[in-house]
Image (spheres, rainbow, N blue to C red):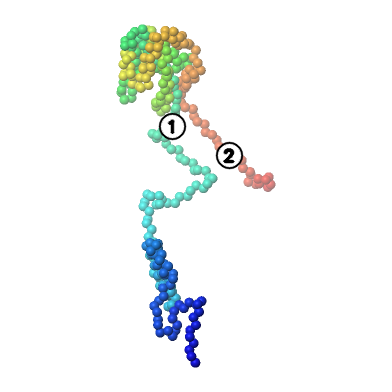
Amino acid sequence: MSAESPVSRPDVVNDGPASGDPQTPGPRRNRRGRRRGRRRGKGGAAAGGQQQSSQAKTTGNAAATRSGGPAETTPAPPRRTAEPKPGTPAAMPPTSRRPHGKPRPAQQNRPQAGGGQRLRTVRETSAGGLVLSNLDEPFDQLQAVLIARIDRRGRMMWSLPKGHIETGETTEQTAIREISEETGITGAVVAPLGKIDYWFVSEGRRIHKTVHHYLLKYVDGVLSDTDYEVAAVAWVPLTELPRRLTYSDERRLARTAEAVIADLRSDPDRLARNQAEASRTEPNDYEKAAAARNQRRNEPPPAKSRRRRRRSRRPNAGTRADGGS
């Protein structure tokens, strides 16, 4: 009986030689390996490393299947975590955040600057002016009256005479009275120069002061420093006022006075109108309110009344909200 010849079928793929074939060809490279080899040149070193690891994993699984047991795997070393440095946000202990809708906790009262309580604010209104020796004299011969005060550091501070408005006075009357008390000179208002305002701290109070200044001409009197607040009194040439005056806002008023004097000399009618307006004796509403504020400036601040909290009405313990017991 003759041996049958092997039948070749096109739909069956022979993975290896038959059991009786004397020839034993080498291991056949699968198509997946060839595809990975082609991609290795395109994907770069990172892709190649991944392919090698996948091939090694496949080989290990195959060896484990042939030997009948699982392949031995080396455990990965534990990952080291760097400890946060002290003082960084990562080293801070976890905090509980405020739930949405709940009120913020009451904050403690922070001390004000300097460790004390908030300073009380006081408004003061004053009037003063610049007294000229004679409006008819040449400009370079005009002189004005200045006063000097000693500050806390012992410095001589030259300024224009001024003082607080009192009850029943106009600003023009206050300027005439204060100049007479501080310098001994009596003057007459001829024109307004403007007003200045500034802030300063005195005796634990923040004071906002407004001063109305006028231009006056000499009428009568002799220089005198009898006022206890005045350290010196002097006639100073008008051209030297910008260098002699201590405060910058009063130096600007001195320059304004030069322009006002030139206008009054060129327009005598304006001088007459200004003198007529300055002769009023009835204070307006602003001057009355300013005098009232000045009178209250040294009074102690009113005590703050503590507001009592109203307790919410709650139903009795033995009754329900719907009225049942």
- Relative to residue 300, is residue 37 depicted above or below? below
Residue hosting label 1 = 118
Which of 322/138 is in front?
Answer: 138
Residue hosting label 2 = 311
**Residue at horizontal 41 percent and vertical 73 percent from the top:** 29
Mark 1 vs mark 2: in front: 1
Q: Position of residue 267 (x, y in %)?
A: 41, 9
Q: Position of residue 100 (x, y in %)?
A: 52, 46
Does residue 256 appear in the picture of this structure?
yes
- Could you tell me the amino acid type at mark 2? Arg
Say which element carries label 2.
Answer: loop
Q: Position of residue 188 (x, y in %)?
A: 41, 10
Circle 1: is it few (<14), some (14-19), or many (20+) Cα within 10 Å?
few
Outermost residue toward the right?
324
Does residue 180 appear in the picture of this structure?
no
**Residue at horizontal 38 percent and vertical 64 percent from the top:** 41
- Could you tell me the amino acid type at mark 1? Arg
Q: CA distance from mark 1 to mark 2?
A: 31 Å
- Relative to residue 279, is residue 295 depicted above or below? below
Q: Position of residue 84 (x, y in %)?
A: 38, 53
**Residue at horizontal 31 percent and vertical 11 percent from the top:** 140
Task: Check contact, mark 1 vs mark 2: CB within 8 A.
Answer: no
Q: Is residue 300 left or right of residue 232?
A: right
Say which quarter of the image contains residue 194: top left
* N-term-proximal mark, 1 vs 2: 1
